[in-house]
Image (cartoon, rainbow, N blue to C red):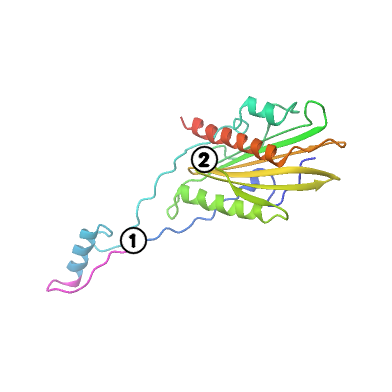
Amino acid sequence: MERRRRTAPRPALLLACAVAVPAMLLAGCSSGGGSGSGDSGNAASSASSGTGSAAGTPTTPALAPAKYATLPGDCATAGKATITALVPKAKNPGGTPAGSVDARDRAGCSWTGNGSDGYQYRWLSITLQRFTSTPTASAEQQAKDRFTDQLARLGKAPGAATSAVQGVGDQAGTVTEKATAAKVTSQNDTLVARTGNVVVIVEYNGAGLEGKKNPTATAVRSGAERAAKDAVAAVAGANG
């Protein structure tokens, strides 16, 4: 009964590769005035400004290195206590890994179950994407761009409510909504967070089966935040 996706196939493809954003080049500035030749004037200006080579060729500033060099294992993104609390009686407590091709750059895992009484469906998915610096865009800037784009896309779903989240990574926001599938309406929350050069997406939803009450929006959002905090800590832990 996993709920339908609204943006891209779940979970690995939710994080598509970010488009590199060109960094600005710093051009040397000089004027040809004075008794010296234009070439010598340009060279002197470039040397004094520190933005060009001795020949006056513009150079690009060095990009900051990526904060995180790797990711935790697919299903090492949430602690056992968190899984027990959010997905009681999970069908596979160890989680179902996404099986990413490049484990250093992508990770994903999901858990599902019907609760201790068999009538409280829960589904939790955690996906991670790590960015590396390119000649034109830093790893962190690419992660910032992906965070902004993903949150905006999720927020366009009918009935979705987007809000900021404090205390989870460097940036975080959540999208809350309800969805109906197979005549069952679930309470859903998708939290997007950024920690350094890594983007985290947590999807958590729940539904009461056979007339049982659904979890509240507050409870589902709280669960998503708990899982996201685990994932952020796991990223830091994987990098020592």
Q: Image height check: is 224 above or below 150? A: above
Instruction: Point out the residue furthest to the right here.
Output: 210
The 10 Å Cα crowd at callout 2, few under 14, some 14 to 19, many 20 or more, is many
Q: Amino acid at mark 2?
A: Gly
Q: Residue at x 67, y 29 (%)?
A: 83
Q: Quadrant of residue 222?
A: top right
Q: Residue 33: x and y, percent? A: 17, 74
Is residue 107 part of the magenta span, yes or no? no
**Magenta residue span:** 26-38
Q: Quadrant of residue 224?
A: top right
User: Dot 1 corresponds to which residue?
Assistant: 26
Q: Secondary structure at mark 2?
A: loop
The 10 Å Cα crowd at callout 1, few under 14, some 14 to 19, many 20 or more, is few
Q: Residue 129: x and y, percent? A: 56, 43
User: Dot 2 corresponds to which residue?
Assistant: 169
Q: Residue 64: x and y, percent? A: 39, 47
Viewer-side residue, 11 vs 217: 217
For residue 54, say whether it is visible. Answer: no
Q: Amino acid at mark 1?
A: Leu
Q: Residue at x 80, y 47 (%)?
A: 180
Is residue 35 part of the magenta span, yes or no? yes
In the rendered view of the protein, which quadrant contains the N terminus?
Answer: top right
Q: Secondary structure at mark 1?
A: loop
